[in-house]
Image (cartoon, rainbow, N blue to C red):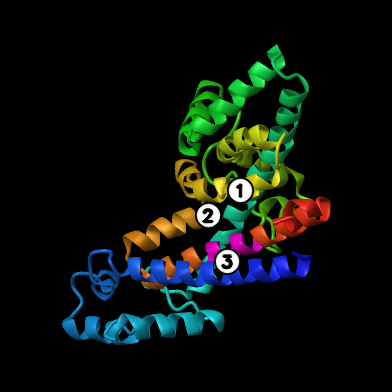
Amino acid sequence: MSAAQYFIRRTFISIIVFFGVSIVIFCLARLIPGDPARIALGPFATKEMVEQLRETLHLNESIFIQYKIFITNFFQGDLGISTYTKRPVIVDIISYFPATFELVLMAGTLMLLIGIPLGILSGKYKDTFIDHIARIISLLGVVTPSFLWAIILMLLFAYLIPIFPVHERMDETLDPPKIVTGLLLIDSLLEGNFRVFSDAFSHLILPGFALALPAIGNVARLTRTNLSDVYEKQYIEGNAFLVETVFVWPGLAKYGVEVILAKDLNGIVATALIITTFFLIINMFVDFIVLLLNPRIILQD
């Protein structure tokens, strides 16, 4: 097939996936026990107050009408009001997303910088001592989940040998840089604040490694065959929530857990759809890069 046909097909599939995920998440969010309006207002709210909030959230409508209202507003940039934070959900997403994006970006960089050379060494020195060591490292990376790596790295390099910090994105005694992108590394560089840059970078190392290690093992194993296969599997983003929780990272995981516990329907669905949208776009971008590097990988399908 031609490149145009391939990307039309990929776009069509991505649209189907988006709507499929949105429907599933929307329905699952409403299966969580408890009345969202009552949870939001607390046990002392009157029935009239609860009923009024239910009307505002359209909870008295059928689930089909609720979904139609939500998805229509979603495409208009309106994700609703969070019953947990009392703010527009889009404001919450903008606030929490940069931390998760910065962590995933660090993990992706480590995945490529370590996984590819490891795979090349393993292939070049096949069946030698170097190959055996590389295989062991790859195997350990693959079979050990990210959250366990997070705990191991924390114990080794934060408590046993206190080299790296483990909580939040930067030292709370430092003044954060002026927000431009929301990414501490970039904003601190734009401000010329190298002390904050160094501190923020040190905070990223352990969670970044914990998130990257399983993917590093897979990249190393697949480097000799087809590197593009790695990107079709969401190793990094799927584990980000667990790693963020262990390291108390103030990203979408923190927000996601909070809105789930509060049964904040708008927050739950919006968080899931924003993540889904982001990684569908990333996968499309990666496919485009792979097509440029080696057209035969895709166009021979």
Which residue does the numbered mark 2 point to in the structure image? 251
Q: How dense is the environment of label 3, judged by Cα within 10 Å: few (below 14), some, or many (20 and up)?
A: some
Q: Is residue 43 above or below residue 108?
A: below
Q: Earlier in the sequence, mark 3 or mark 1?
A: 1
Residue drawn at x 69%, y 47% is 228
Q: Which residues are magenta?
A: 274-281
Q: Secondary structure at mark 3?
A: helix
Q: Earlier in the sequence, mark 2 or mark 1?
A: 1
Q: In terms of depth relative to the viewer, which is nearer, 227 or 143?
A: 227
Amino acid type, residue under disc 3 in the picture: Thr
Which residue does the numbered mark 3 point to in the structure image? 277
Q: Is residue 4 above or below residue 150?
A: below
Q: Are marks 2 and 1 in contact (CB under 8 Å)?
A: yes
Q: Secondary structure at mark 2?
A: loop
Which residue does the numbered mark 1 point to in the structure image? 103
Report the Cα–Cα distance between label 3 and label 1: 18 Å
Task: Let me know if residue 116 is in the magenta part.
Answer: no
Report the Cα–Cα distance between label 2 and label 1: 9 Å
Residue drawn at x 54%, y 66% is 274
